[in-house]
Amino acid sequence: MNKPLKIFAIAVSSILLIIGAGIAYLSLVFDPNQFKSQLVELVKDKKHRTLSIDGNIQLKFFPKLGVSLEKIKLSEFESPTQFAALEQAQVSLALMPLLQKQIVIDKVSLHGLQLRYQRDAAGKSNIDDLLAKEPATDASPENAPKQAMRFDIEGIDIARSQFEIDDQKAQLQGSIKDLNLNTGKISDKNKTPVKFSATISFQQPKADAHIELNTSLRFDLAQKNLDLQDFKTQIAGKLGADTINLQIETAAMNLSPQQGASEQLSITAKSDGAQSLNAKLILNKLAMSDKKLSLGAIELHAEAKQGGASKLIDLKSNLTMDMETQLLQLPQLAIQLALKDPKLAQTDIAIPITGHAAINLKEKSIDTTLAAKFDETQLHTSVQMQNFSTPAIRFKVDIDKLNLDRYIKASAPETASENKEEDLNLAGLKSLNLNGTVNIAALQVKNLHINQVQLPIKASQGEFYITGIAAQLYQGSVAGGMHFDVDGNRFQMQQTLSNIQINPLLLDFMKKDIVEGRGTLSLQINTHGKRVSQFKDNLNGTIRTQLTDGAVKGINLAKSLREFKAKILNRSDQQQAANKNEKTDFSAMSASINFVDGIGNSDDLDMKSPFLRVGGKGQVNLRNNTLDYTARATIVNTAVGQDGADLSQLKDLTIPVKISGPFEQLGYQLQFAQIGSEALKSAFKAKAAPALEEKKKELKEKVNEQLKDKLKGLFTR
């Protein structure tokens, strides 16, 4: 019994000795470098790329089968341009398990790998040829039994690698440098530590960051299952001019083709720059089964601060997703929005929001409905968006009552040192594609009270249109449209206010009690500017008004003319400040102002009253906020109207009235000195002489009576 065993042992030892000697002989006499040219030709023939191997090729046969390569380069498809380069690569396999169809890789080592990826706007890339499937050459039966293979890797070592990316379709351009990957033993049902690090430098979008990833993984090949434990990723760098820090963590996650689960996954983000941001996203009770993904709760807490202002948002909802249709739904959105800003009239604003949202990742669309109730406002809105890269947004907003004056603080006049206005930069609005309507039942802004507001808004390629504007205000209505072009910051407006009461409108909007009456106001204006302050300096267009049954407040022309009549021979001008208790009635008034570069001229004033006709001309200067206007008042019918009978002696006389000064302190001057001497004399002669003759006759009779009494007394003594 022992003898056969000895014979068998000697035979096996002899075979192994012969194999070992053969391998040793091959490793000594076989030089793989002599096959470099064949490898180069093979790659050229099969892949139409140029392969160059400037370093040595080394083979090992025992105890592990391995290959080592140095200084390798590969060109682009049918081009001499370099696609990839490698300083050193090494792969080795355990020989004996390979004979049993078990793959046991000792080590995979890649040092100094360089790759260049390019894709044009149409989606064609420089690796399409490498990804193309080769024609099947396997003649073995399809139903042949497949033997399970053991898969073991002692470790992966990738160091000093670099990837250049130029993806025009995804609008990505930059590089991933100093990429390092180290793992422990990777084998079925074995827990493996993994460490990864890389530096990202992108020009589009502008971003620089360093990434570090640490985790432990375990996979089960039979169950096609992957477990991650103590997963932690940290990203630190710059996005544009802002510093960012991002951290992703989970204690455990289980993934498989059919299901997955994690008790909690958290993402923390911090950003420092002109605006600081702190945000934390928590995904609770993540579960995936039967191509359905669900989250028991998603929580977002984010706060942004800039200057003394802050914005705080708290969001909560459950989440479901169909992996086949890629439809993600947030059916129970609850959002708390808190705003703090010392520049607002109401420094603290809390807005609770509820609603639901659906996001279709396959169709790249969003459909959401939201409702909010805060302060005195109730708001309902629906928003639909198509295409994430260039969004097309459709919306409808319904608001019952909105008082913007509650939140907008009245601006105090700026001193010259404070007035450091910056240029408007609205280039970011060019990408907006909007189409929707805002409806507000009651709106207050700048103390104006407006009802039933309808604002149809469209925006595309940097141009904004608000056409079909409609609203009710001050017992009248408004209709018209607006247009704004981001290129040049150009603004146009056509508005018609019909049948409005002008006095309460001016009182609310301008705090000016200067005109009464009902009528129409139309505006056709355009302007532009790099800064907001330049808009009034560059104003062009026309403003027209027609009013009836009203009054000009601040001056009583009838009273002033009566005073003039009392000192008709004293031709001095009469200067007076505007007096809110005085007014000049009119039955109709119309006027227009034509603006050119912020300076408006008017020469068609036509104001009518029972005893007056008023025309005039002058200038409105928006550049320095002043008015210089001369009205010419002519007394016509003195039988009726506002104290007309007292002015019969001034009929047909025209008197200039100069209105001038800054908008905040207008003054009135009746320019009697501008009336010609002959006109005064004629008026005096025509109107005052008969009265003097009557007075003379009365005086003569009185003198005669007195003389008669004196003579009678004389003769009776």
Image: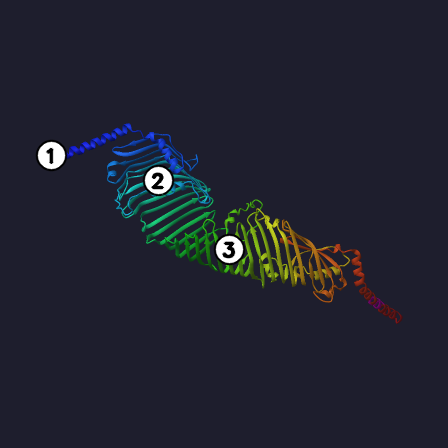
Q: Are marks 2 and 3 in contact (CB under 8 Å)?
A: no
Depth check, mark 1 against mark 3: the one in front is 1
Residue 86, can we see it? no
- Residue 562 location in percent, x, y? 73, 61
Residue 435 — which label? 3
What distance separates the C-alpha of mark 1 from that of mark 2? Answer: 58 Å
> Residue at the bottom extreme?
716
Q: Main secondary structure of the magenta part?
A: helix
Compared across the picture, whether 649 is left or right of 549 comes to right
- Residue 387 location in percent, x, y? 45, 51
Q: Which residue is mark 1?
A: 3
The crowd level at tag 1 (other Cα within 10 Å; few <14, some 14-19, many 20+) is: few
Q: Which residue is mark 2?
A: 196
Depth check, mark 1 against mark 2: the one in front is 1
Figure quadrant of the C terminus: bottom right
Front residue (pair 478, 52): 52
Front residue (pair 505, 416): 505
The crowd level at tag 2 (other Cα within 10 Å; few <14, some 14-19, many 20+) is: some
Q: Secondary structure at mark 3?
A: strand
**Residue drawn where x is 37% and y is 47% of the image:** 267
Q: Secondary structure at mark 1?
A: helix
Q: Is residue 495 magenta?
A: no
Disc nearer the start of the sequence (1/2): 1
Looking at the picture, which amino acid does disc 3 mark? Asn
Looking at the picture, which amino acid does disc 1 mark? Lys
- Establish if 454 lies above or below 118: below
Looking at the picture, which amino acid does disc 2 mark? Phe
**Residue drawn where x is 36% and y is 51% of the image:** 283
Residue 487, can we see it? yes
- Residue 442 location in percent, x, y? 52, 61
Identify the magenta region: 698-703
